[in-house]
Every structure is written in C-alpha cells, then in structure tokens.
Amino acid sequence: MKRLAWFVIPLFVVLALAGCRVLPGIIPGVRGEQEPSAPEPAPTGASQGVPSPSSSDDLPAAVIQNDEGGPVVVTGEVAYTNPFFTEGVAQPLILLESQAGFVDRDRKYVIPVEAQTLGQITSDFFESPFTYSLTLPAEPQAAARDVDNDDAEDAGVMVFAVAYWDNVFGGPYLEERDLGGGGWSTSYASTRTSEDYETEREIIGGKLIVYAPDNEQGFPSAFGEDGLLFTDDDPIVALPAGYTVVNLDAEPFVFDRAREQKIDLLEAEGSALEDFSQMGYAEAFDGMVELFSTEYAFTEYKNIDWDALHGEYRPRFEQADRANDALEYRRALRDFLAEIPDGHVSGPFIQEDFQAGAGGGLGLAIREVEGGEVYVNFILPGAPAGQAGIVPQARILEINGQPIQQAIDSADPNWLGPHSTEHSRRLAQLVFATRFPPGETVELTYQNPGESEETVELRAVPELESLFFALFPEEQMGFDLPVEARMLPNGYAYVQINSFFDNKLLTVELWNRLMQTLNANGVPGLIIDLRQNGGGWGYIADQMAAYFFEERLITGRSARYDEALGDFFFDPETEEELIPPDEELRYRGEVVAIVGPDCASACEFFAYNLTVDDRATIVGHYPTAGLGGGVEDIAMPEGEMVRFTVARAVDVDNNIHIEGVGVQPDVVVPVTPESLFGGEDVLLQAALAELGP
C-alpha cells in the first residue's frame, strides 16, 4: 500500500507572525468506493474491434483496438490536489509497477529490483499536473501470474500499473521501506482502488498494462459477478503476445495495442483535498461540520457535540454571508475551531486581532516552577519591565490585582491553540498571561531577588521578542539540518532531530551516516533530543526508530471513517510496522530521548516507538504535546485551510495512547529556580546521568 504520510503541525500560527509557515503532513481520509468513470469511447476506423490472433482453442480471442503491434512508450499526466504531495520529496519517480502482489492479494509483496522499470518526469514536478514518459522494456522481468482460471499450469502474464513513488531510503530503485512494506499503489497510479471497508484496495477501474510471453495466455475481459478482478468468476479471453493496455472502466474491458499510449495517473478520492472554497460561508461551514461529525477521529473520546456547536455558530456564518463580511467569517471559523481540544486542529490566524489583543508585551517572559511560584526568565532591554527595575529571577506575585495563579488561569491559551493536553494548555496560558493590547496599562506586583515586594504600572508596547523567547528557546532560522549530531566529551553521542518534515532523502541519509559513525566508533550510548521537533512524516519517524531494533515490530494501527460502514474501521491487515534497516545500520547501544511539549505528532510516535520493549529511557520536564492521529485539510472560502484529525491512532492493544496524554517521561525532571537559572541544560544532564559515567 502506498503510504502518503502522517502528520503534524508545530506552532505555525506564531511562525506566521515572522513571515514563515510550517506545514504538516497528512493521512488521507477514507471516502468509500469511487464510482467508475465513464468508459472511453472506442476509436473509429479499421483498427476498431479486431480479434487478436490466438492459438488457444479453448478461449475466445480478445477484441483488440488500434492493433499496432503493442505499446512501446507510455506518456501521461499526474494531477494532484493534496497540499502535501510534493513536501519533502527529493527523488520522485514513475514506476512500471508489478501487480503480482495484487493478483496474489499479498499486501507484503515487495517488487524485486529487477522488475522495476523507471520512467522520466518530463515537466515541473512541483506544479500540478506534471507529465511523465515511460518506455516499456523489451523483455520485462516481473513475476508472471496465471490468471486464466483453467486449472492448468500456464506461463501466465505479467501485470503492471504505472505509478508514482517517492524514493527515500537510498539507491536508484525502491526497497521495502520505500514501498511502505509492500503491496500495490492505491493512489497516483493508472488504476483506481476501492476505499470501501469490504473491498478495500481492490482494483475497480483505471488501466493496466499486460505482457503476454506468447499468444496462449488468458486474461479477464470483465469483472465477474463478484465485481472483483482476478477471481474465479472472471470471463477470460486470449491475449496476443507482447504488451496490451487494458481499460478496466469499459464493459467489457477494452484491449488496446497502439504503440503510443496516454495513461494519466489518478489521485484517489481519499488522497484529494476537500474543497469548499467556492461555497458561501454558511454552506462551507455546513460541509465542514458534516465532515467533522463523521470523520473527526476523537469525537467520543473528547465528548464533542457537533450538532450543538453547529447550532451555536451557524448564525455567525449566516450573518457573514448577509454582510459579505470576510473578516467576521474568519473570526467565526477561528472561534469554532477553538472549541475542539485538539492540537492538530488549525484554521485562520487573524493577525489584526492578535495585534490588537495580544500584540503588546511588557518585555518579560515567565516560567512556573514546581510548587507554583512564577519567575521572570527573560527581560528585553529597554522595554517597560526592565525600565521599571524588574530583573531576571524576579518573582511575579500579581497581575492587575489578581494573584499570579488566577491571572494565568484566566489567560487565553487559544492564541496558540487549541491544545490536546492540559500541560500544553497551561504552558500557553503562561505565555499569554503577560500579553496585552498595545497601550494598555498593567499593574504588576513583583519581588526581585533579595528585595521587597513592589507594585508598578507598566504600559504594554508592541513587541514580540519576549513572545518568541517563550515559544522558541532554541531559535531556528531555517539553516538547521533535520538531523544534527556531535560527540560529547564523555564519549557518548548527542543528536538533535529538528524535524520529520524536511527533505526526506536528506533526513534519512543524515540518519544513516550517524548510525554508521556510531557503529564504526563503538559509541556506547546516544542521547536523542526531540524537544524542538514539531513533527512531520509519521512513516519516516517510524522507520528511523526502527534502526534501534533487531526485529520487525508492530507498534499500533489507525482507524479511519468508512462511509459504507458508517463508522471507524481498523483494517486488520494494516498495521504500523517498524522495518529494521540492514544490520550494519542498526544501533545497539544505550539510548536516552529528551522530550517536551513541543515534541508533537510524528515526533511523539518516534518517542513512543523508543519505549517499546524499554528500548530507550525518556527524560523530560513534561510529556509530549499529545497529538495522536493523522490529519486532513479542507479548503475553505477566503483562502483559508482547516486541518482536523481523521486517523485514530492506537497501540497494539487498541488503546488510544498519544492523543490527549502524550508520551510520558520515565524520568521527570522538575522545573525549579535552580534549573531555570543554573546556566546548564538540566535535561541533558539528566540524560547523561541515565547513561552513566
């Protein structure tokens, strides 16, 4: 099965303030079986309806169109709407994909290298649609399958689709990990597959390319009564030797042997972007809520009443329609989404509202320590707090007459929200407890170290430095590599994985190089720092975690809504599996991972994988963000994109294991004044202590 992605979003709302945007990955939602497209009209002329020559006395000959001796070259287009289709892709390729796995219904079938024929991408891959060209090999090397249902052993035929793939794990051809563990393509291929839970992944339309070694091989001329291909009730016809293109959307199938074939690759419905952008505000809202009410992965888990929310918010969208007010529409959309306690959910960031409501600061940032005391950990030179004499390590006691704990409790966390976990929500409230409308007068009661309590009035000024300090303690400017490693003085290694959403090939190559270096130098222990990793491609995260294991491991599965079933469906044949790399790349030393609330989504699955069989020790002040599912985007009016969770991830015992809870540290390091102001990285020190002297 082709795995398009997992998902994530780091703090893109705040990053938008700095003029950049971080996009996450996506798990397509299941939409049920697609209706076959209309059959292509048969060409006119002498080439129409010519029976193929056959020496088989038992089978009728296939009726051939355009009998020019068989296809030689195939060209076509690949149109995509999925907003993450090109993200992180470094080696896109077009493959003549053997369908032996589909004929066998073997979802673990790995296409041998010798069977892989690569095409060429002939236009800009990063602009949809792109074009391709593929020259068929004179003597293909794929596995043949006997599909004529005559109970005799025949040479059989080679069955192919044309498919798009992303080559990530090295070498010019695809290996098992590139192929998602095996199987056959379910999107961006010349075939269409069912998304219905009863017939999931069954080929239901599109085009196949078939190679017969001689003129004595049979092939289905239609789907049988069961509606499935390559089953016992298929009607069979004899094929001529060589290549034939089979149009499965015709009834019966159309067999075409023109030398030049145009075959477009098809985006599956479940991979395509849901697009409500051309609707009115209220109509688009209705469509969005309908999707949420059926496809949102954690409705019962989070006790969400979609009907009540729809009734509460629809009047605002109706009013925006009547007034043709784009701003009020965006505000209504933002406020509706803030009702969903899920850190993956995102929508409009309204900069003017942010600037008016929270664009002012006092030039300080605060942190809460164990026991509930709140300390200043950042002072912006020249800003109001510093000018008033407040210094780092000062305790904040009251804001506007409210005790500091009440002030934090009343702060709006949803400038960065919503949030999946209480600890993430609390940390966001800490950030915004000191944000105000520019120009507002704020009464602040504080106590500098060794001094008496004081109360001052400060005027909030437009400044973002204190906000960025609170959100991004390790500033990343875009020059960071996805994987950055170094040796520590005590002989252990340290690696910071900054993202799982960077160039996928580069990420894996850097990871391979690290593992080779660790093993070549006999490094006994590795510290993996995940604190600033906002997530990305879950499949990449899974397979990078596999380098720490000797055997394949099932770590969980995901359920998605199935329209035909009317419920969420766990495909019993689809599991999240770690596939270890070649032996020389496996690392067997001790491992400690450092996590925090900014480790989100795919980062959390990587961290969770390390807990399997107690492979690593997890160290942190807090759990991870608790974003435990795959996401999908919806295009809404006014250029807005709404993201929501459509895949319900569970562990091997079917327990929701990340959403709403995060990955818990084995070693919880309390936040204390000493840890804040001691001048050392206490989490790194705790990780080193776990590795030993």
Image (cartoon, rainbow, N blue to C red):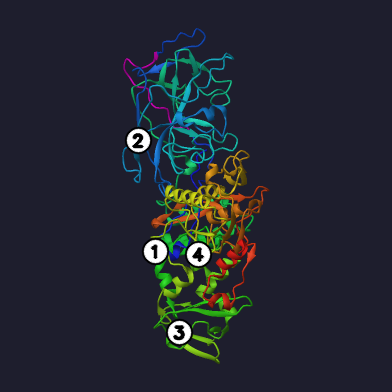
Q: Nearer the viewer, mark 2 or mark 3?
A: 2
- Rounded to the nearest angstrom, the CA distance separating label 3 from label 1 is 27 Å
CB-based contact (under 8 Å), mark 2 and mark 4: no
Q: Mark 4 sits on what residue?
A: 335
The mark nearer the N terminus, 4 or 1, is 4
The mark nearer the N terminus, 2 or 3, is 2
Q: Nearer the viewer, residue 82 or 513?
A: 513
Which structural element holds mark 3? helix
In the rendered structure, which amino acid carries the disc numbered 1? Met
Q: Quadrant of residue 22?
A: bottom left
Q: Tell me residue 363's x, y (percent).
A: 44, 80
Which structural element holds mark 1? loop
Q: Nearer the viewer, mark 2 or mark 4?
A: 2
Q: Mark 3 sits on what residue?
A: 385
Badge 2 density bin: few <14, some 14–19, many ≥20, Cα 10 Å: some
Instruction: Let me know if residue 410 appears in the view.
Output: no
CB-based contact (under 8 Å), mark 2 and mark 3: no
Which structural element holds mark 4? helix
Q: Identify the magenta region.
A: 36-50
Q: Tell me residue 645's x, y (percent).
A: 54, 53
Badge 3 density bin: few <14, some 14–19, many ≥20, Cα 10 Å: many
